[in-house]
Amino acid sequence: MGRGLIKYLVVLLGALPLATATAGSAAALPPVSGGSEEGQIVSSQQAVNLLNAQRAAHGLPSNIVENPAWSDACAKHSRYVKINGGMDYSNPHSEDPSLPGYTPEGAEAAGNSVLGGTYGSTGENPWESAPLHLMGLLAPGLVETGYAPGCMWVTGLTTTPPAVTETYTYPGSGATIYPSETAYEWPYQPGEFVGIPDNTTTGPYLFVFAHGSDARCVRVSNASLAGPAGSVDVRHVDNFTDGLANFMSVGAMLIPRHPLDGATDYHAVVEGTVARGYDCEDAWWDPKPIRWEWSFRTSAPATPDPTDKRTHARPQKIRLRPVHSHSRLKVDIDPNGGANWWVRILKRQDGRWVHEKAVKSRGSRHVAVINMPKGRYQARVILADQEMKSRPVNLRR
């Protein structure tokens, strides 16, 4: 992913927990930014170590080093976002010099980083369910980065790629991955380009990478995935997918149309061509055949503790209503039963629902009162087999 090519790709929600994701569900969602409910925010170097550990577990190069100046620039941008009341979704990968908190370093970080995710004490990648962002973080050529809560630099690519093209996958050969995910990133998810509606729970997004001096663009001609029950319905996007050209790392994504079975072995094959070129949309030359073939396993569904009543609590209704003279939103879950649930607050913008905030219930019916700007809002909570939605409401402040 080259400098500036991540423009307008802003993550909205964080990680799908690797250990607890279950078939047919999206797991609990952490906050968008500003810390982790699960524990203290990790340091910049710890975040780089966590990313390296994830890459190593899947056979990807794991020699990324921290650039302290980039970490400082990321911190400046995160401070700018906080001072100005949140991310500006009209132009998220920049800063307005006329606004308080602007710095040239922060503006540079905004234009060279994935945004909106924060590592917590669980160590899970906060961009795990944002495929375009995650692919940039896992790109084999990434050798240098900077990190602060809400920001991680992704354009620190090697200047000496291998002369012979190397191939990598995520998950790696023999590795384990969650059986399902619901991708969340802005302004779109890759699945939307191949007939998968926004907010659809699918199987895990599977990545293939080409890394080398002659590898600039990948075009997939055939992709398949099979498990014990036979072939799996998969879609794919690559560097030539209309709308994604030049926004993806060099490679492709396989998207199982439906959640995979848990604790199951799968075998994937991807065939196509890789070529040099300056722009995947307009200029590429000298295509060569390329192939990926590997097996991986899905994790087992989480088993509820029958002695813990909280694991069986299931909301029947989620309610969102304006309070304080239509200046704030009040969120209720009924019944809550002592369980903790992540609730997404979405705002209607340009004909679609866009994520604005995530709040966590604390075992009581009342979840939170939230100060939000004027607009139309909806609250959603993800259960094991569905996404429950509130009735939309308007704030007139």
Image: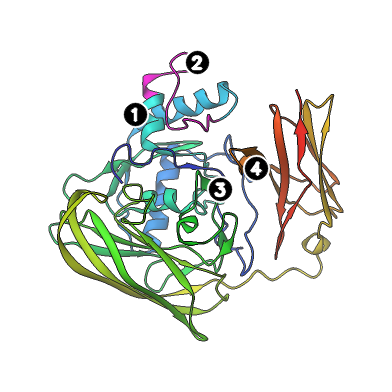
- The location of residue 69, given as percent across then percent down, is 34, 28
Q: Nearer the viewer, mark 4 or mark 2?
A: 2
Residue 357, located in which quarter of the rendered image? top right
Q: Position of residue 301 (x, y in %)?
A: 63, 71
Q: Classify 216 as above or below 43.
A: below
Q: Nearer the viewer, mark 3 or mark 2?
A: 2
Q: Which residue is mark 2?
A: 99
Q: Please, what secondary structure does the residue beneath circle 1 have?
A: helix
Indicate whether residue 159 is drawn in magenta. no
Q: Amino acid at mark 2?
A: Leu
Rendered image: mark on residue 192: none
Q: Residues within 10 Å of mark 2 (few under 14, many from 20)?
A: few
Query: 280 or 311: nearer the eye?
Result: 280
Tell me, yes or no, whether the highlighted magenta stretch contains residue 101. Answer: yes
Residue, disc 1: 69
Colour mode? Answer: rainbow
Q: Which of the two labelled residues, at mark 1 and mark 3, occupies the earlier sequence position?
A: 3
Report the Cα–Cα distance between label 1 and label 3.
Answer: 25 Å
Looking at the image, is 6 positioned above or below residue 19? above
Q: Which residues are magenta?
A: 87-105
In the image, 148 versus 389, the foreground residue is: 389
Disc 3 versus disc 4: nearer the observer: 3
Q: What is the CA distance from the residue labelled 4 to the residue labelled 2?
A: 29 Å
Drawn side of residue 170 relative to residue 374, left or right = left
Question: Mark number for residue 37?
Answer: 4
Of pointers 1 and 4, the one earlier in the residue sequence: 4
Rendering coords of residue 201 (x, y %): 59, 62
Q: Are marks 4 and 2 in contact (CB under 8 Å)?
A: no
